[in-house]
Image (spheres, rainbow, N blue to C red):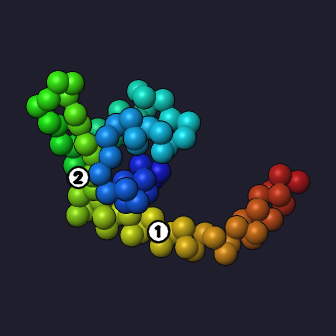
Amino acid sequence: MMIILVLGKHKVLRFADVRRSVVGISPKMLTKSLRTLERDGHVNRKVYPEVPIRVEYSLTEQGEVFLKKLVDLAAWIKPHVPTIVKSREQFIK
């Protein structure tokens, strides 16, 4: 989800820029996640024939729809955080 949100905010990013923006993800996991998102049709991967090779990532139309749903979910979660926290605390007891 974080990759979708980051690409939605910045539109086009190189791998290193995505990595800097998604805190706590290893390069291996980021690569795997980007490949999965590309395979599923959410992310475009564009390779430029340069030395060194430049690769850029962006959202597809489908990725943009996914982004909107994530933003809607975040908007719902924000006012409900106190209730969620309270439920978790009660569950632990």
Residue ranking furthest to the left: 49
Within-10-Å neighbours for mark 2: few <14, some 14–19, many 20+: some
Tell me the SS state at disc 2. loop
- Which residue was labeled with disc 2? 41
Q: Earlier in the sequence, mark 1 or mark 2?
A: 2
Q: Where is residue 9 in the image (x, y as percent from the top left)?
A: 40, 60
Q: Position of residue 13 (x, y in %)?
A: 32, 46
In this view, the residue in front, 93 or 53, is: 53
Residue type at numbered disc 1? Val
Quarter of the image holding residue 76? bottom right
Q: Which residue is drawn at 41% across and 49% down?
A: 3
> From the viewer's perspective, is 47 left or right of 84?
left
Q: Residue at x 25, y 62 (%)?
A: 62
> Which label belongs to residue 71?
1
> From the viewer's perspective, is 54 left or right of 29?
left
Residue type at numbered disc 2? Gly
Tell me the SS state at disc 1. helix
> From the viewer's perspective, is 7 left or right of 87?
left
Q: In this view, does 15 lie above or below 40?
A: above
Mark 1 to mark 2: distance in Å? 19 Å
> From the viewer's perspective, is 72 left or right of 93?
left
Quarter of the image holding residue 61? bottom left
Q: Quadrant of the C terminus?
A: bottom right
Please name which of the two marks, 1 or 2, marks the residue nearer to the observer: 1
Within-10-Å neighbours for mark 1: few <14, some 14–19, many 20+: few
Quarter of the image holding residue 87? bottom right
Q: Is residue 64 above or below residue 53?
A: below
